[in-house]
Amino acid sequence: MAQTVQTTFGSASAGDPYIPTGGNGGYLAEHYDLSLDYRVATNRLNATATITARALMRLDRFSLDFAGLSMEKVTVNGARPSKVTHNARKLVISLGIPVEAGATFKVVVRYRGAPHPVHSAWGDVGWEELDDGVLVSGQPCGAASWFPCNDHPSNKASYRITIACESGYTVVSNGVLSNRSSRSGRTSWTFDVREPMATYLATVLIGRYRRRDLAAVPVAHSLYFPARLATRVGTDFARLTEMITFFADRFGPYPFPSYSVVVTDDELEIPLEAHGLAVFGSNHVDGNHGEDRLIAHELAHQWYGNSLTVARWQDIWLQEGFACYAEWLWEEQRGGRTVDQLAALHRGKIQALPRDIVVGDPGPHDLFDDRVYKRGALALHAIRRSLGDEAFFAALRAYTAARRHGHVSTDDFVQFFAEHTGSRAIGGFVARWVQQSALPSL
């Protein structure tokens, strides 16, 4: 009988078929300390990433996602590895002294280059130059465009992000601004993220922004925007405090220390969510509340997506379906169409589309298909109508509390709601709306 040899090589993939080369095995990153020195005028980055990780197995070799930049030096626990190779997407590190299972180890990567988006099945994602500044849009696999990482949502970690750039710019990133200092025409900004954060939600925004603090309750929230858009931004986000308060009542306490909205001077194809942040383009503000739906959607992601994060991309309906349902809740709250009316409207629209998608496992090509969003929301509405408002929203608040800053899956959602409410119907609603292509009746 052939003897099985136990590998000591961490996998160069998280094993997610939606992103076959994304993420890495054999360890979990627990903390990223990123020190970035960036020149806006020339798009030049010099940086050091210090990654604290925990081995899940005995490691002689492991990898990091890292794309488009040049590695200068790598150390592991202060020593040079026996070998380092860097291909288009992976930094592969072979160790002279293995890391034992369960041990914590520290990886330091010094790197440089001109950061740019990486190509993906969903277009270019990651670090992007604006007309006068920077935006990072990492979903689903763009984090590797600006720092070496384990780029998969199943591995959340804490962060410290320090960015130095020309003093004429404002820098916004995730977490709490813990330090800012200026010297010789350059300003350094340090942000601390204490809650576990998925790599795709890490961001850096650099621009010539004004800041406006709106309120301190129910959580501190601020706007960043170009001066020319001050009036439009002030009008369109005037209801943000009311919106946060409403969602906190429905979903439970806001999950992070603060919330910031950034409006770029550039137009953007779609708004973006990030941990503690949302980003809108100049085309998303009209001074007439024309995009309240999008404002609600991105805010809701702070609960569903950023605090409660899918461990595998196929379950994305748990993020987008919830955020879509939040849009409907907000419209009703403001005196517009009721959720019942919106559910009937969107079911009718879906009915006119091909029924060739299972939103609980849509496949990579349809990961961001609108049917994933709308059928996910319809599943929630069906559950709500079955349970009644009191039981439904109590279960939502319990769910966000129990899974706060953790991971969620479809099976976990069904089990949690069934146990919390005592309803045997939850699995059936999810099966009909999420796990089959046929379109149920409301």
Image: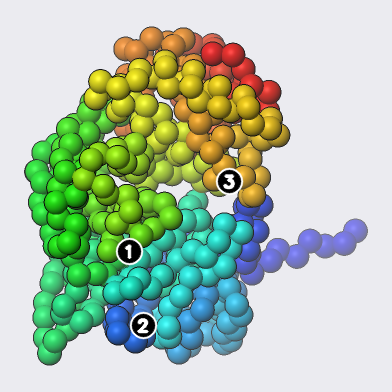
Residue at mark 2: 43
Residue 52: percent from the left, percent from the top?
39, 68
Mark-to-mark CA distance, 3 and 1:
26 Å
At horizontal 61% and vertical 59% (from top left) the residue drawn is: 121
Q: Callout 2: few (<14), some (14-19), or many (20+) C-alpha neighbours within 10 Å?
A: some
Indicate the secondary structure of the residue bearing disc 2.
loop
Residue 64 or residue 26, whichever sits in front: 64
| Image quarter of residue 434 | top right
**Image quadrant where one finds the N terminus:** bottom right
Residue 98 or residue 226, whichever sits in front: 226
Mark-to-mark CA distance, 2 and 1:
17 Å
Disc 2 versus disc 1: nearer the observer: 1
Residue 267: percent from the left, percent from the top?
36, 60
Disc 3 versus disc 1: nearer the observer: 1
Vertical order, 418 against 328 (above or below): above
- What amino acid is found at the position of numbered circle 3 in the picture? Leu
- Are the residues flagged by discs 3 and 2 in contact, CB closer than 8 Å? no
- What amino acid is found at the position of numbered circle 1 in the picture? Asp
N-terminal of the two: label 3 or label 1? 1
- What amino acid is found at the position of numbered circle 2 in the picture? Asn
Residue 19: percent from the left, percent from the top?
61, 57
Res 313 visible: yes
Q: Which mark is residue 367?
A: 3
Residue at mark 1: 266
At horizontal 49% and vertical 18% (from top left) the residue drawn is: 344
**Is 5 on the left-hand or right-hand side of 43?**
right
- Are the residues flagged by discs 3 and 1 in contact, CB closer than 8 Å? no
